[in-house]
Image (spheres, helix red, strand yellow):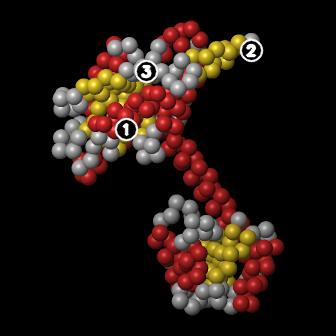
Amino acid sequence: MKVLIADDSIVSRHMLEATVKKWGYEPVVACDGQEAWDILQKESAPQLAILDWVMPQLTGPEVCRLTRQQHKDKYTYMLLLTSKNQREDLIEGMDAGADDYVTKPFNHHELQVRLRAGRRIVDLQSELLVTQSALRQQATHDALTKVYNRHSIFEVLDREIGRAERENLPVGVALLDIDFFKSVNDTHGHIAGDAVLCEAARRIKASIRSYDSLGRYGGEEFLIILPGCDEACTKSQSERIRRNLASEPMPIHEDAHSDISLALTASFGSTTALPGHPVSAETLLRIADESLYEAKRAGRNRVVFRSILGEDRSLSAAV
């Protein structure tokens, strides 16, 4: 673990550097408070810091105060190194955001145990961040396909509609249904069905742009949100995703003796919210859903686009 050592005394600095290196830490050295502050602002900043109280440009307490004002996700544990021993001075340092202090000349064992305590806090905070990230993933993503769940993709849609209205931009949506999915479950079992859903999600994610969003709408249905897509773009993007889904059969491992290949196709219903024509998420989804069922009635594995203005309906059949 990296440790920032900030001290304007070259003798003290070298002594601290050699000491923490002996304990297995990686020292990062600063010669004054401004350099220490510059280092702590970097993405790869040490999460342990030993700061001399009195330094040129910025004092140790000033560096502590600036660091705490950042409110970064990763916690920085800061020790003040000081010859001050008045209670008021120590209160000032702790109030500035320091976690602890060590008096000069420092006792090696005291510094070691305080650093060890700091490392425990940093490690615990890192574990907490990992846990929070995992819980956030579980709360917002579908457990099977790892794409957004229904609630989260609805939130994304509301957010994108609001942004499109503010910026006077279109936003497209495509609702798709995996063709003949029930027969996959009935014939090959639910494990095969799960594999089909996961492969479909993978192919869709590989087909959309980095700023598009994909969510599992329910069962074998997926919802794709296409920011900035006008009607022509929504049609072409939906058709491109449809072709990529159907590009090759999907292998299914049935048992130890046989493998089969399944066609992976989907029916699409799509529409676009247009600038100057405010529309709710519910209306967009209703139009996309009606278009989807029209695609299924027309033979599946095709895209049906319907304009929110009711002036355009185009059918793109599978080739």
Inspect the image, locate mark 3, and give the three-letter code of the amino acid beneath it.
Val
Labels 3 and 1: the sequence-earlier one: 1
Labels 1 and 2: the sequence-earlier one: 1
For image coordinates 46% across by 71% down, the residue present is 69
Q: Is residue 60 left or right of residue 13?
A: left
Query: Is 297 or 15 nearer to us in this picture?
Result: 297
Residue 145 vertical placement versus 319 (above, below) = below
Residue where numbered disc 1 is placed: 225
Q: Is residue 244 left or right of residue 277?
A: right
Residue where numbered disc 2 is placed: 256
Query: Is 293 or 190 nearer to us in this picture?
Result: 293
Residue 95 in view = no
Inspect the image, locate mark 2, and give the three-letter code of the amino acid beneath it.
Ala
Task: Answer few, some or many: residues within 10 Å of disc 3's Cα (few below 14, many 20 plus, some between 14 and 19).
Answer: few
Give x and y (percent) for residue 305. 30, 27
Inspect the image, locate mark 1, and give the three-letter code of the amino acid beneath it.
Ile
What kind of element bears circle 3? Answer: loop
Q: Is residue 131 left or right of residue 107?
A: left
Residue 120 in view = yes
For image coordinates 74% across by 14% down, the residue present is 256
Give x and y (percent) for residue 38. 55, 77
